[in-house]
Image: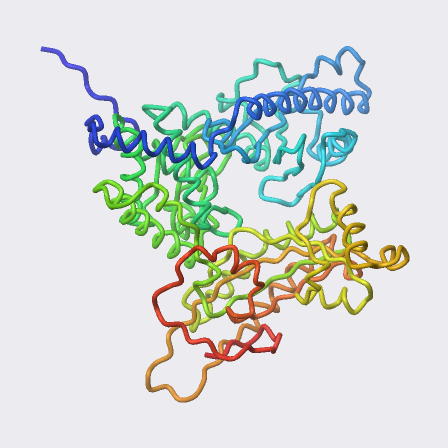
Amino acid sequence: MSYEVPRHWGVTAPISVAVSSAHEIELDADLLNTLQDLGLFENEHDAQKRVIVLEKLNQIVKEFVFRVSRLKGMPEADAKDAGGKIFTFGSYHLGAHMADADLDTLCVVPRHVERDYFFTVMYDLLKEQPEVTDLTAVVDAYVPVIKMNFSGIPIDFVCARLELSCIPDDLDLSDNNLLRNLDERCVRALNGSRVADEILRLIPNIPVFRTALRTIKFWAKRRAIYSNVMGFFGGVAWALLVARICQLFPNACGATIVSQFFQIMHKWKWPTPVLLKHTEVAPLEFRVWDPELYPADKSHRMPIITPVYPAMCATHNVTYSTMKIMIKEFKRGAEVVDRIFVGSGSWIDLFEKSDFFHAYKHYLQVIACSTSPESQLEWSGLVESRIRQLLLKLELNDMLFLAHPYIHGFERIHYCLNEQEKMDVSKGIFVPERTFPVGEGNADDRRKQQTGHTIGYSNGQMNAMEAVYTTTFYIGLFVEVKPDRSAGPRKLNLAWPVQEFNKLVRSWEKFDSTSMNIVVKNLRSNMLPPELLNEERRLKRPQRKVHRSRRNHDDNPQKVTE
């Protein structure tokens, strides 16, 4: 008697193949309604707008390849035939993007179009487009990228060059042989789209996956643990985790997947890796993630491995502190969902905002400033990309239990009347009536005029106002509790990590000491800017008693007194 062997959707058999109960299906409908009420689904107009933007970008890519081909002396007909194509990756490709999500795009070009042209010819071509604003190139990123807003949609734009003479419109990136003779940066760029395709192939139910992923990503953003650059999980890692839970419960609905996600992840035995399939060995020269062969791979604290060749760890940035924070959040999520399933909680409870700016007695404030919006985009991006190095050095201090980074910086524009005010801004001392969140396009110029008129400045005074741009990052410091019998105050000396961080960012080849500055300061919690605290007024403060001493006016970042 023959029977069909159940399919394994991953490296192990499913935990359960049971279908969801009526109660779970009811909770799933409630979850979808909650996500809808929160505005997490894109409307038809905005969805069509993304399609139009992608079509325009595809034409720009073809024009880019054509221009470079002609620069290299290629006949016009051959230059037109050289092609070029846009691919998407990330949440948009997976069908789980939010209404305000970035659009991750990949530009694939033929072999005669070197990457340098992407940051010169393509950059200039994008500057010509009236729809493009906030254009900046991050050439030395792990995956070199052009960032921009196109018709108001934030876009991360990467490039890969294939060993092909032309790029056809029907190109399929799944063939491993396309990676032959490519450098690692091109492979990393290509694998964004390749990973997204493979995730969708390896899960049993795509609509269920999308519901669960949308939920988990929104939860992670609300709990301030969504940022690869800051040492948390990025979009790929969250997608891989959700996909693995879908494999383990192939017939479950979205609400059940979310519940099992938290139940499993807060008990996961790290550094056991999360895999969607066994790593693939191909006859190419690329390094595949393998902790048995490579000591660096063994150091990964929470390895989540991509499912395409060459297998890579999507979470190599995780630090000791960010790992502890995420595990704590997984446990909280499990407790909240347990209450939802027994009827004593609601899905909105899961999305309660992080209390980061109420959680610590001490913070480091990192202020990157410059005098133009263009230089600030690059400079603040560079500083942000190096904050993880500061975290690693902070963690070496025995008195510091956690160094908790907030997931994004706060951008401000300051209109200064003199050099002293410009110097004060670089140190975090702002004039409130002339400090504003950064706008888009020419909004900042209009605000300057409005500000001057409101305050009653003359035209001469308004013309004399100079703009200074700042991006401010915060790191919460959890200092180890002082032993009961210890005598006198203790001083947490942060001089070495701060000095090393300053040296690191100032060594950037584009750093200009005449127009850029970096300042790192220690703040007590009662010195945080009011708008950060006001942002979270609706949240309950922690129940534990927090001792607040009088305000410390010393801006020296090197010492924290306990």
Quarter of the view holding residue 556: bottom right
Q: Position of residue 116 (x, y in %)?
A: 72, 35
Q: Is 265 drawn above or below residue 74 in the view shown?
A: below
Q: Residue at x 63, y 39 (%)?
A: 144
Quarter of the view holding residue 51: top right
From this viewpoint, which residue is outermost toward the bottom?
A: 487
Q: Position of residue 246 (x, y in %)?
A: 31, 31
431, 385: nearer the viewer: 431
Q: Is 177 drawn above or below residue 491 in the view shown?
A: above
Quarter of the view holding residue 11: top left
Res 163 visible = no
Answer left or right for 83 relative to 190: right
163, 322: nearer the viewer: 322
Q: Residue at x 57, y 23 (%)?
A: 45
498, 475: nearer the viewer: 475
Q: Position of residue 370 (x, y in %)?
A: 74, 56
